[in-house]
Image (cartoon, rainbow, N blue to C red):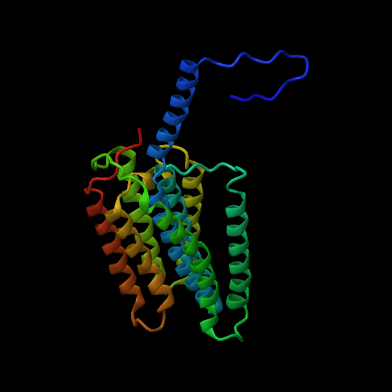
């Protein structure tokens, strides 16, 4: 074992063979604990999913902005912010740690460059109505290729990882269950607002819902925070959320095409709330050790 000399200090005596073996065993144990804590395939799949959701959000947001519907854009923004909070909990559940290290610097710089480029193209697509509507697909394509492509590469690299044993599903209880129900109620209310013809009512209640979201984000580190709720979800909960989020977005994008959007919003909101009430009875993920 080599060591760097320190001025004014005598060199340390090298350890004997038994102590050196213990050092190596301890280092290997650290590597094994890290491998058990970090689920690389799950992180890669989540990165691909985030790329798809972000791309769809950019398309929907750009379309409603081109139509000048500010209230509709707030509804789209709300669903995306909720997903961002939920997915952060899913990432932490699989072992992701939000730390700035030298090894992660190239990925962070590359991801930042992709997002900046996508936002620049998004700005032109959303604000310049002289451009054809098909241009709104460009920022989505940038996100899919840049971030989604990186996720695919990470998934291929993790394909040789050993199979991880996961704890069995456990019933959602307490804050996790009520929090899941509240997510459904919030999206259900937004769905009803998306079909409401009264702009004053939509504006007032949308502002109230956004303020509630801000308060919910403020307690994101608690047991009732959205990251903790997302960490307890399994694929049925995620699927119901994604389908539910599509309902208000579809209503605001299809305004004027769906006919009586008011009743469509009411029934759609009721359906969203009922689906979330059902999914709260489905077991979720156990907490990490």
The quarter holding residue 175 reads top left
Nearest to the observer: residue 127 or residue 214: 127
What is the total number of numbered labels drawn onto the structure image?
0
From the image, which quarter does the C terminus lie in?
top left
Residue 24 in view: yes
Task: Please state the horizontal and vertical placement of residue 99, each as a whole percent of the image.
Answer: 56, 41
Residue that protrudes farthest toward the front in the picture: 17
* One can see residue 75 in this view: no
Which residue is more in the foreground, 111 or 214? 111
Q: Residue at x 52, y 15 (%)?
A: 16
**Residue name at image x 39 percent, y 68 percent:** 248
Q: Give the vertical position of 133 relative to 88 (above or below).
A: below
Q: Quadrant of the N terminus?
A: top right
Where is residue 174? Give x, y as percent.
30, 38
Q: Quadrant of residue 259?
A: bottom left
Residue 268 position, x and y percent, is 30, 68
Residue 177 left/right relative to 186: left
Q: Is residue 246 above or below residue 13?
A: below
Q: Is residue 110 depicted above or below 137 in this figure?
A: above
Q: x, y percentage for residue 280?
A: 25, 49
Front in this rendered view, residue 237 or 149: 149
Q: Residue furthest right?
A: 8
């Amino acid at each position: 074992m080599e060591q760097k000399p320190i001025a004014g200090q005598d060199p340390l005596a090298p350890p004997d063979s038994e102590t050196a073996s213990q050092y190596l065993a301890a280092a290997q144990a650290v590597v094994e604990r890290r491998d058990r804590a970090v689920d690389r395939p799950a992180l890669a799949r989540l990165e691909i999913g985030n790329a798809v959701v972000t791309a769809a959000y950019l398309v929907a947001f750009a379309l409603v902005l081109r139509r000048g519907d500010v209230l509709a854009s707030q509804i789209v923004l709300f669903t995306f912010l909720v997903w961002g909070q939920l997915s952060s909990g899913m990432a932490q559940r699989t072992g992701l740690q939000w730390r700035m290290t030298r090894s992660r610097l190239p990925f962070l710089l590359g991801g930042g460059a992709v997002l900046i480029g996508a936002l620049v193209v998004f700005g032109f697509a959303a604000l310049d109505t002289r451009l054809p509507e098909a241009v709104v697909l460009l920022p989505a394509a940038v996100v899919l290729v840049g971030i989604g492509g990186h996720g695919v590469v990470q998934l291929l690299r993790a394909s040789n990882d050993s199979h991880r044993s996961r704890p069995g599903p456990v019933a959602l209880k307490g804050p996790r269950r009520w929090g899941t129900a509240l997510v459904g109620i919030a999206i259900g209310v937004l769905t009803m607002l998306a079909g409401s013809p009264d702009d004053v009512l939509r504006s007032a209640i949308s502002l109230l819902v956004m303020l509630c979201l801000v308060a919910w984000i403020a307690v994101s580190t608690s047991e009732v925070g959205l990251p903790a709720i997302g960490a307890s979800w399994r694929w049925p909960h995620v699927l119901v959320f994604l389908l539910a989020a599509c309902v208000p977005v579809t209503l605001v994008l299809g305004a004027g095409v769906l006919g009586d959007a008011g009743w469509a919003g009411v029934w759609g909101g009721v359906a969203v709330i009922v689906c979330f009430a059902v999914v709260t009875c489905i077991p979720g993920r156990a907490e990490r050790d």
